[in-house]
Structure formats: C-alpha cells, structure tokens
Image: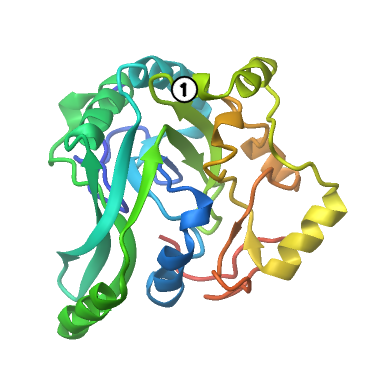
Amino acid sequence: WRGGGRSGRGGGGGGPGKGLQHTCALAVIPPRELWQPIQHIRSKHDKAYMRWMPHVNIIYPFLAYESFAQAAKDLTKACERVSPFTATLASFGSFKQRKVHTVHLKPTCSPPDAMQSLWKECVEATVGMDAVRRPFKGHLTVAQFPKASAEKAISALESDWKSISFPVTHVYLISRISQTDPFRVRCAIPLKGARSSSSAATAEQKKGVGVGVESKGDEAQEAEQGDRGEAFASVPSSSDVSAVPLFTEFSEEDEKAGKPAPYAYPLDPAGGAQGGGTTAGGRPGEGKAK
C-alpha cells in the first residue's frame, strides 16, 4: 500500500495519497452507551452529525472499499502488536481555521502513547508511512463555531462536560456509498487478545456469524428505525463488540440493495431525529456533505 492519512475529522496525519477515498476511513469508535453526552453537543453544533458516528479517525481518507478485504488481513496482523488500552475524553481543544474553530474532545490514553502506537502500526500496514506529512493528532470532533464566538462557546462546553473513559479493543473499517450517506461499520479489527474475551463469539466469528445481537425481522427493524429517527450505521456497544465477525454481514452491496443494517445508531440522544431528519429510505436529508 502507498498513500497517506491526513489531519481531517478525528485524526490521521499526512495528506490524501493516490487512491485514497473520502468515503472510507479507519477509526476508533466509543461504545454506543457512552454516546449520549457527545451526541447532545454534536446534534446542535456539528455539521457532520448526520453522516459520522462519534469517532477518532486513525486514517482518513482511506483505501477504497474494494481494498477492505486485503486491508483487514494486514490490519489484523498489525493490531496483534497493539494491546487494548483506555481512552479518556476529559477536555476540549480546537483547530483554528480562517472563519471557524473546529472543536474536538482530546483523548488521553493509558498507556500515554497507545493511540500513537496504534496509528503507526495501522499506517505502516496499509497506506504507508512514507506519505505521512503531519504528526498524528487524535481527536473526536464535536462542533464548529464562528471565530468570534469560539472561545466563549468552548468555555461553556467545558463547564458542563463530565469525563468519559472507555476501553479501546477494536478499530473499525467504515465506509459510505456516497458523500451524502452516513458511514457504516464494515469490519471490526481486534487489538491483541481482544477476540479471546469471548470464546463463544470467537467460535461464531469463524463461521462469519454475529452473536449477542438481537435478530429482528425487516419490518420490525425498519419500524424501530423510523420511530427513533435512526441512521443506518453499524456500531456495536461494548457488550457485544466481541461478537462482531471480522467482516460484518452488512456490505456496501447489501446497503445498495436496501437491506437493514445489523446495528443502528440514534441521531438524537433523546430518540428523535434532528439536523435534517431522514428520508423515506432511512438516509439523511439533503445537506452539505462532510
């Protein structure tokens, strides 16, 4: 592989290399049960709220979806050299652009260099370190504010924020069909020893079948998604992440065929869709893609 990540949404150092796609990424994703306070901020202030789940990009843009099978094999070997670690979201930072400040949560890790090590292993295994032009700065984007009001807005966020910690046991290959579609998890890559946490799950993974996920008929799942205003994005909770097969059963081909995703995430923490809602097919309403 040759290319490079860039400092975009959530991380990735360097500049977009040849063959890398903004419809694909490799990311760390917090468990769903911890999303509520993050989504509360994003639903009001993040223009990409409808299209990205809460995430820290390890590499973005990334290799095309058609390369995911080989990338998954390479990443599986690389991630065997990285032990699971704890990430804590305790403080905010910002990237200052000409007109706006992009605000993010700054992950601190235990051990301190764990996410940097994960980034290095993943880059070397896939896009290639030779194309990286900027240091990796992991971050979870939550808002954009006009330059004039950014300082006051960030202070308000900090005064209400309570620290969140979560175990990082997997990285996720995610993709979207187009710039206006939400990202969905295509593949969960375990860090060293993560799959051994559930022998039953490991056995099912070998069969390519997920366990620990409630099975619902198409009509029931579609009704639930419609009632709760959910986008189709396959993100597991910490309780069932070990049950995600190496490759999920929800491919881009399944998505194009209109099949329901095995997981869905609520756009609004209170249960209703915000920021444009969804169209009849469960896709986000029109708006500027990011």
Residue occupying the point 41% across, 32% down: 169
Let me know if residue 165 appears in the view.
yes
Image position of 270 with respect to 148: above or below: above
Q: Nearer the viewer, residue 279 or 153?
A: 153
Where is the C terminus found, in terms of image quarters?
A: bottom left
Residue 215 locus on image (x, y percent): 79, 41
Image position of 15 with respect to 123: above or below: below
- What is the crowding at mark 1: few (fewer than 14 residues within 10 Å), some, or many (at least 20)? many
* Amino acid type of the residue tagged 1 in the rendering: Ala
Image position of 250 with respect to 128: above or below: below
Residue occupying the point 25% across, 67% down: 103
Residue 216 locus on image (x, y percent): 82, 46
Q: Nearer the viewer, residue 65 or 232?
A: 232
Query: For the residue labelled by badge 1, is the local secondary structure a helix, a strand or a loop?
Result: helix
Q: Nearer the viewer, residue 10 or 118?
A: 118
List the residue tagged with mark 1: 72
Residue 62 locus on image (x, y percent): 37, 36
Instruction: Left or right? Give the position of 239 relative to 189.
Output: right
Q: Quadrant of residue 60?
A: top left
Image position of 179 with respect to 193: above or below: below
Residue occupying the point 46% across, 27% down: 189
Instruction: Left or right? Give the position of 221 relative to 52.
Output: right
Instruction: Left or right? Give the position of 194 relative to 201.
Output: left
Instruction: Left or right? Give the position of 60 relative to 43.
Output: left
Where is the N terminus found, in terms of image quarters?
A: top left
